[in-house]
Amino acid sequence: MKSALTGADIAFYQANGYLIFRQAVPANLITDLRRTAAKAIEVARRLHGPQAQRLAELNQLDAGDVTAVRAFSELPELNVAIQALLTPRHRISGVQDTSLLFEPAEGCWAMEWHRDWRDHMSAENFGKVFAEGWETLAADPRLFNQINCALYEDPCTWFVPGSHRRLQDTPGEIRAVKAADSAALANKRRERTEAEQEILLDDYCRGMPGAVPLRLQAGDLAIYRSIAWHTGSYVPYRKRATLHCSATTPEYEQFWKRAKTILANGGG
Ligand SMILES: O=C(O)CCC(=O)C(=O)O
């Protein structure tokens, strides 16, 4: 890693809900991971089409291709830094809980601004998954620490610093989310040219009060509270291969397991 974690870094994470570790991955491992990513993007597009954002099913890859991902999740220096930032119970999630994120093949698009979990399920399921209370669970440092680690330069992720500590949305935030819906953000019917769509997406991301892009260089790692406001905006002409996983704990694994059962029974 470029530099050791400091007390100021920990304070920054607590205040802002994100932190970037510069050069977190050694160059030789980046090379191996890029080789894995080159195969993974083919599988992602075969399974999910040309606009595929990710491959979550890394078990679709040959065992040899997954070796580099395992080496990443076990990087000793990085796990020590994550533990210093969070708690000794945290570690980088394993291969089965890691995805690779890619650029689209055909047209630019963006996700809607969201807070993970809350904005990805029905109100009924949300009530069950967050029975202990949204604000209580969202403030629990053992849960919801997400990681993006870039294998190529990656400015796709946008984030609202501090929004992890303010869990009720402001009117300005609600307006920014609703400035475009998922159909407009996907430009599915190709109503706009690529250039027009790219400008729309830029306006959409910048329209969220306080939003900043998390600009990563190859080997940089962003850790962020996934219950904070964030989104991703993608263009086909900029290569992307970014590892997407979490700094997990036994408690977060339990939370996931329980949530999956609820969602499977309740229909998502
Ligand atoms: O592409 C990104 O970095 C954002 C992904 C994201 O927001 C999500 O998976 O919830």
Image (spheres, rainbow, N blue to C red):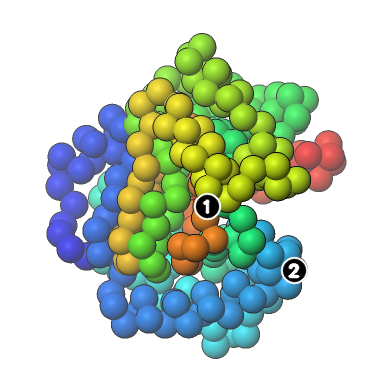
Tell me the quadrant of the picture where the N terminus can be found.
bottom left
| Horizontal relation, residue 45 to residue 84: left or right | right
Percent across and percent down for residue 215 are 33, 50
Q: In which quadrant of the rendered view does residue 218 lie?
A: bottom left
Give the label, 2 or 1, closer to the camera.
1
The residue tagged with tag 2: helix, strand or loop?
helix
- x 83%, y 36%: residue: 266
Front residue of 75/118: it is: 118
Q: What crowding class fits label 1: few (fewer than 14 Cα within 10 Å), some (14-19), or many (20 or more)?
A: many
Please state which amino acid type lies under the numbered disc 2: Leu
Front residue of 206/260: it is: 206
Label 1 CB, ligand 1: below 8 Å? yes
- x 25%, y 64%: residue: 23
Percent across and percent down for residue 140 are 45, 32
Q: Is residue 138 above or below residue 242?
A: above
Q: On the image, numbered disc 1 is attached to which residue?
A: 234
Badge number at residue 47? 2
- x 48%, y 82%: residue: 35
Q: Is residue 248 above or below residue 52?
A: above
Percent across and percent down for residue 28 are 31, 82
Please state which amino acid type lies under the numbered disc 1: Tyr
